[in-house]
Image (cartoon, grey):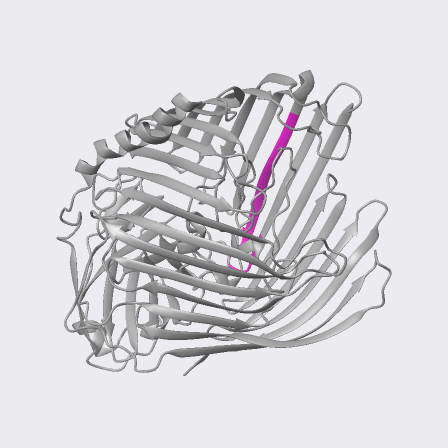
Amino acid sequence: MKGFYNSARYKIPLLLFSCMLTFCAFAQKKNASYKYHIRRATSNIVVDGIGDEPAWQQADSAVNFHMVLPMDTSLATIPTVVRMTYDDHNLYILAVCYTTIPGPNMVESLKRDFSFVKNDNFIFFIDPFDARTDGFTFGANAEGAQWDGSMYSGGSVDLNWDNKWTSSVKNYPNKWVFEASIPFKSIRYKKGIKEWGINFSRNDLKGAEKSAWAPVPRQFPTASLAYTGVLVWDEAPPTSTSNVSIIPYALAGVTKDYKANTSAAFKKEFGGDAKVALSPSLNLDMTVNPDFSQVDVDQQVINLSRYELFFPEKRQFFLENGDLFSNFGYSDTRPFFSRRIGLNQPIDFGARMTGKLDKDWRIGLMDIQTGTSESGGLDAGNYGTITLQRRVLDRSNIGFMFINKQVTEAPSGSTIGPNDYNRNIGMEFNLASRSNIWTGKLLGLKSFTPGKEGHDFVFADHLQYLSKYWTLYMQEEYVGKNYNAAVGYVPRVGYIKLNPLILRNFFPKKTAVLSYGIQVNSNYFFSESFNRTDNESVLSFITTFRDRSTVTISGINDYVKLQQPFDPTNTGKDSLAIGSQHRYNSLDILVVSKPQSVFTYQLESIFGGYYDNGHRLTLSGTIGYRFQPYVNIAVNANYTNLRLPAPYGDTRFTLIGPKVDITFTNTLYFTTYVQYDDQQRNMNINTRFQWRYKPASDIFIVYGENSIPTPYTPKNRQLVIKWTYWLNI
């Protein structure tokens, strides 16, 4: 173990990264020669999708888009023309999206924040600091459904971010036109900077073509900020002397808890958020008595794992610049996970200050106070978090994080005391080369918990090489047995992990197949004394067709030596013994349909061995049909059959989740989501009506119910009416 620490914990990660730093030195921006000159508008602009104002005729045009898919070696065959301008208050954009194939546009629905791959769409990405690490994205599909999100990690998009702006789409026989007005108050930028990063992206499903104005290699998303061009302002963008948004809400509702056999409870609540721009690039968010009843419910899954499942954050308050907090660490070693705060207990108040101090520094400060939950036995606590991020080299950064959870009041009858706390401190180096071909991370964390001293560290790193033909990846991870992230997501402790991956792509010519890929991936876990506890090795053959459909066939080899008792059915039956060893093989087949069809599907079959010399068959998938552009129907289903020796026997699980989205207009939505899960013996119904009567202002009517499916017995029901209003001061 000591030898492993000396080599793997220090020497290997540092050697890997020192070998790569020479590739990431300061260098010219990849697409610096692609410049769009934006000039002040010479006339008023009406956002109507027509674009006949004199200001548009005098604006420069961005043309000659480059093809990204199916191949990235030529100009796009489907023309797109983009123009931009601005005035004292708004940034304006006009995109003329020509069509070359007759027939209706392919759209999923009129719902906001649509799926990129299932819609004809135009979206664009802005990087106000031209740092190629974070920014904003806006756009619409061909029927006018809006898309907006915050960007982080050089090209990842958080579509849960929502802000105030207006747009219009108008269709013509041979084109569709997107026009939008984005208030300068809705984006964050530094006063005086006259060059921003910019790129425009077009997805045309009928032509099976994805394109971008500044060229992007096909292995990267068009959102990759490493490949943005330059938006050159004729004068520095205007800044507001006042940028304050007040977002109050009022709520009325009724709930009934049938399990507790209590009377119906009526409630009325008031609260709200405030956004204060301390500078054009630094924002203060405050909330008092927030309510999240309108947030989408989580998608239920059949859980056969030994560890806690991860569900993403969807609450608006936590989202702007949320990557500063949530992206620290790895997917299974997150020291901060905002869903630990206030999900099953009330949030009394909170404040967040996030944004950029300058081109190189980002900051995040958060403090939230929660109340007690007597029914859930949860203590009141104060959650304080500090994170700093410094850009280094070209697109890389060094990050620091400190997290403190302090118990302030325990529920009655609890043994938790007000002196209980959990603290985490950590640093990480995130590597991103100029072209994004090399990426990586080097991470260190330490926790502080009363009674848990020693073995309370995390050390981890990874390095990835990504080209058109090759993907090479290696991750190493150590998590001590006493490491504790009370405000994080760390489902497993006391292990060492090695995760190598190799992928090779092949591109045949003049066939229906666009590419073949052969991938080998392994996850090896060891105890802290470096004894193997489990590993999963996967050999995959991936076929991608020119119509964007895919078929993936994987052979999987599993080995597990249990470190904790485990019920392989996760239903509360007897557990397999600690130290018992299990070896089995399985085959996984995944088929994903082409996105151009109104009928789409993703089907997966896993069959083979399982724990205790058992057998497993899982059939899962999602089937969708759309009546364009108003109705989108999707059914998520999973059938799992486990055949195990006594005392388990044959166990069958069924999960069915039909979801219907009806979008009467791009501001009026109705969604019904039903989930039947017999593993948890629960059926959930969530119905939501949303009317966006003004930009970023809504009225919601939400009905939710949980029940035992057989025999049908209600557990709880809730009906809520909620009003919100976004007021800019």
Residue 265 horizontal side relative to residue 503, left or right: right
Q: Above or below — where is 141 with respect to 581?
A: below
How many numbered discs? 0
> 385 and 547: which one is in front?
385
Position in image of residue 706 (x %, y %): 75, 54
Task: Tell me the quadrant of the picture where the C terminus can be found.
Answer: bottom left
The reply to whether residue 478 is visible in this rendering is: yes
Q: Is residue 104 visible?
A: no
**Quadrant in the picture for residue 568:** top right
Residue 725 location (% of width, % of height): 52, 78
Residue 251 sits above or below residue 77 on the image: below
- Quadrant where the N terminus lies? top left
Residue at image location 21% in from the left, 51% down from the top: 214
* Front one among 120 and 439: 439
Q: Main secondary structure of the magenta part?
A: strand
Foreground: 349 or 668? 349
Tell me which corner region of the image, top left, top right, bottom left or bottom right, holds residue 169. bottom left
Coordinates of residue 9 in the picture (x, y in percent): 37, 30
In which image quadrant can residue 176 be found? bottom left
Q: 660 and 638: which one is in front?
A: 638
Question: Is 626 included in the stretch rendered in magenta?
Answer: yes
The residue range painted magenta reads 617-632
503 left or right of 424 in image:
left
Residue 325 inside the magenta-drawn segment: no
Place of residue 40 in the rendered image (x, y in percent of width and height, measured from the top left): 19, 76
